[in-house]
Amino acid sequence: AVKRAGKVAKRYEEMGGKVTSFGKPYVEHFEACLRDLKLPKDRVAHVGDSLHHDITGANDTGIASVFVTGGIHREELGAELGSLPEVSALKSLFATHSQTPTHVIPMFRF
């Protein structure tokens, strides 16, 4: 069995191979992190810029999510780097991707 996501895994499946996916957005990945951290879901928020990988995984796992608008969806939102997009643009993006985060921030810095 191949343990990778993406085009190689898809092609391998098409050829009849068995693929096991692990990582974002799979619930098992998020639950493994919770287990390793020994934290309950209500004490965790997942931060990320991908509605498909980050927000879907958090939503499916039942944990809070923080969507970073300055990431991969920034152009789609028509937002300036470091500023929050218009609420209407956010709602449209969330509807398009069928995912809504619990929180939204413009950027994430250390």
Image: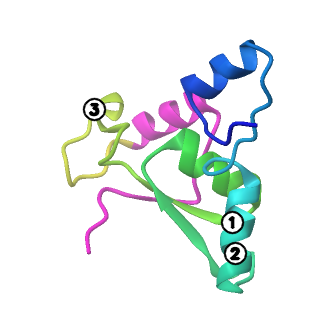
Query: Badge 3, how many Cα within 10 Å: few under 14, some, many 20+?
Result: some
* Residue 97, picture quadrant: top right
Task: Assign the C terminus to one quadrant of the image.
Answer: bottom left
Residue at image point 53% right, 42% down? 51
Q: Which residue is mark 1?
A: 63
Q: CA distance from mark 1 to mark 3?
A: 28 Å
Residue at image point 65% right, 34% down? 98
Q: Is residue 91 left or right of residue 84?
A: right
* Residue 18, picture quadrant: top right
Residue at image point 48% right, 62% down? 47
Q: Is residue 101 left or right of residue 93?
A: right
Helix, strand or loop for disc 2: helix
* Residue type indicated by callout 1: Ile
Task: Assign the N terminus to one quadrant of the image.
Answer: top right
Give above or below for 98 relative to 29.
above
* Residue type indicated by callout 3: Gly
Q: Say which mark, if any, is on residue 34.
A: 2
Residue at image point 61% right, 36% down? 5
**Residue 98 counted in the magenta span:** yes
The x and y percentages for residue 108 are 31, 64
Magenta part of the chain = 87-110
The x and y percentages for residue 107 are 29, 59
In the current view of this chain or complex, which residue is farthest to the top?
A: 15
